[in-house]
Image (tube, rainbow, N blue to C red):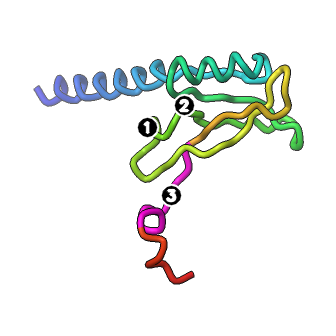
Amino acid sequence: MKRTFQALLLTGLSLATVGTAVAEPRYNPRKMSCEAVQDAIRGHGAVTLRYTSTRVKNLPLYNRYVQNTSYCDMTEVAVSASVPTIDRERCPVKLCEHRDVERHRFPWLMND
């Protein structure tokens, strides 16, 4: 009985992980136009973009890019960024960045 429960638990966790991976597609922006990258983000809400650095040889770079803040965690906000595409060195996109909620809501209370 205990082994059956453990097997079911592991299967459930595996499926949950696979479901998350399938829900958010991955793209190489260097093989896409800027418009295609932006369309993919709009179409899915959030995607992972992965490409190789131009400054450091063979260094893979990747991040999660989003349509807007609603695709970020509660403590994050969508900020402007850029990625290289086949037709542009800096294609405008957005990514989630941590924000200091108290500083954001009550800036006059902060003493920096």
Q: Is residue 102 left or right of residue 30?
A: left
| Quadrant of the image containing the N terminus | top left
**Mark 3 secondary-structure assignment:** loop
| Quadrant of the image containing the C terminus | bottom right
Q: Residues within 10 Å of mark 2 (few under 14, many from 20)?
A: many
- Can you identify the residue that label 2 sits on? 67
**Could you tell me how far apart the alpha carbons at marks 3 and 2 are, in whole angstroms?**
17 Å
The correct choice, above or below, for 3 with respect to 99 in the image is above
Q: Which residues are magenta?
A: 96-105
Residue 99 numbered mark, or none: 3
Residue type beneath disc 3: Arg
- Can you identify the residue that label 1 sits on? 70
Do tag 2 and tag 1 residues touch (Cβ < 8 Å)? yes
- Which circle's residue, 3 or 2, is located before the other in the chain? 2
Residue at the image point whose x is 56% and y is 50% from the top: 97
Residue at the image point whose x is 46% and y is 35% from the top: 71
**Could you tell me how far apart the alpha carbons at marks 2 and 1 are, in whole angstroms?**
8 Å
Residue 19 position by quadrant? top left
Where's residue 23, x and y in %? 45, 20
Where's residue 3, x and y in %? 19, 27
**Could you tell me how far apart the alpha carbons at marks 3 and 1 are, in whole angstroms?**
14 Å
Where's residue 98, x and y in %? 52, 54
Q: Residues within 10 Å of mark 3 (few under 14, many from 20)?
A: few
Q: Is residue 19 left or right of residue 66?
A: left
